[in-house]
Amino acid sequence: MKKSSLFKIILIFLIQIILLNACGGDGNGDDTVGDNGGNNEGGNEETTFTTSGFGFSFCETAEPDIELWRFETRDFEDMTSPAISSDGTVYIGSADKYLYAIQSDGNLMWEFRSETADEIINSPSIDSNGTIYFVDAGRTLYALNPDGNKKWSVADIGETEIAIAKDGSILIGEYALNPDDGSINWDAGYLVTQSPIIDSDGNGTVFLSSGTILMAHDVSDDSEIWEFVADSNIRRAAIGSNKTLYFGDANGIFYAVDKNGEEKWRYIIDANSTALTTPVIGLNGVIYVANNGCAV
């Protein structure tokens, strides 16, 4: 069977799953959150969910069998999660080395090929001026104007996902870049292993992870506010509405750290030391984290 035919069969199967979950599927499971003596305050946590892109568009209120449009990349390669601008343009990267700009009706607006001929594996980001940022697997960061023309690029700058600070700074890995020309505003001075996280209230704090250490930095001058040391390498954190940071480590331990860098509680999810994924906080305050394929 040809690769393209197999890919289309898989996509049709995925459509059915997406429609069942997004258009009438029952998402209320019997998930529970355990407590092994920690002081879990509960609270009403909130989060913003991003959608995963398979190249399709469905109306939120449409019947499950209505497909609004379909877009296929050049070589049926894996796509990133999409980013959507204020005018409805969908930007999505692909392992075929292209970033695509797709109109809200599903028509291609433009495409931009990675200059290093490396695949695009992380979701693009859009700033308040409409500039699109993405990084390829060759660690080159690109800034594109809304018309698809390159604004600037910086080589060997990092491979984490991109975060945009309130002052417009572009945060990737250990670097903060000037959005005008890509020059480096500051370098944290150590290897950042997870994508930067901007404080949800936009007060200029960014959280960086390096091995076992989670650090809070001031975006404006790179001054360190605090650091927290876990037992083993940590994954990217999620921020709750009360500014608590939740994250797991490679030894199966899950942490809650307050806005001042103090540990609130920890929970041993897996005594066999299996790495945990990045958590997601549901609208009802339940924290979801996967461990070896199991949701906890």
Image (cartoon, rainbow, N blue to C red):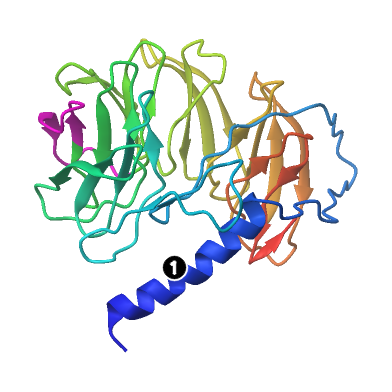
Residue, far bottom: 1
Q: Residue at x 14, y 48 (%)?
A: 114
Segment colored magenta: 142-159
**Which is more toward the observer, 261 or 10?**
10
Question: Is 280 left or right of 172, judged from the image as shown?
Answer: right
Question: Is 249 left or right of 170, judged from the image as shown?
Answer: right
**Which is more toward the observer, 128 or 147?**
147
In this rendering, the answer to whether 163 lies above or below 91 is above
Label 1 packing within 10 angstroms: few (<14), some (14-19), many (20+): some
Q: Amino acid at mark 1?
A: Leu
Q: Residue at x 11, y 31 (%)?
A: 150
Q: Is residue 251 shown to the viewer in this render?
A: no
Q: State which quadrant residue 165 falls in.
A: top left
Question: Is 293 left or right of 284, judged from the image as shown?
Answer: left
Q: Is residue 121 magenta?
A: no
In this rendering, the answer to whether 200 lies above or below 253 is above
Q: State which quadrant residue 259 falls in.
A: top right
Residue picked out by circle 1? 11
Q: Residue at x 15, y 43 (%)?
A: 112
The N terminus: image quadrant = bottom left
In this rendering, the answer to whether 256 lies above or below 108 is above
Q: Position of residue 253 (x, y in %)?
A: 70, 51
Q: Position of residue 5 (x, y in %)?
A: 33, 79
In this rendering, the answer to whether 25 lies above or below 246 is below
Per the image, label 1 sits on a secondary structure element best described as helix
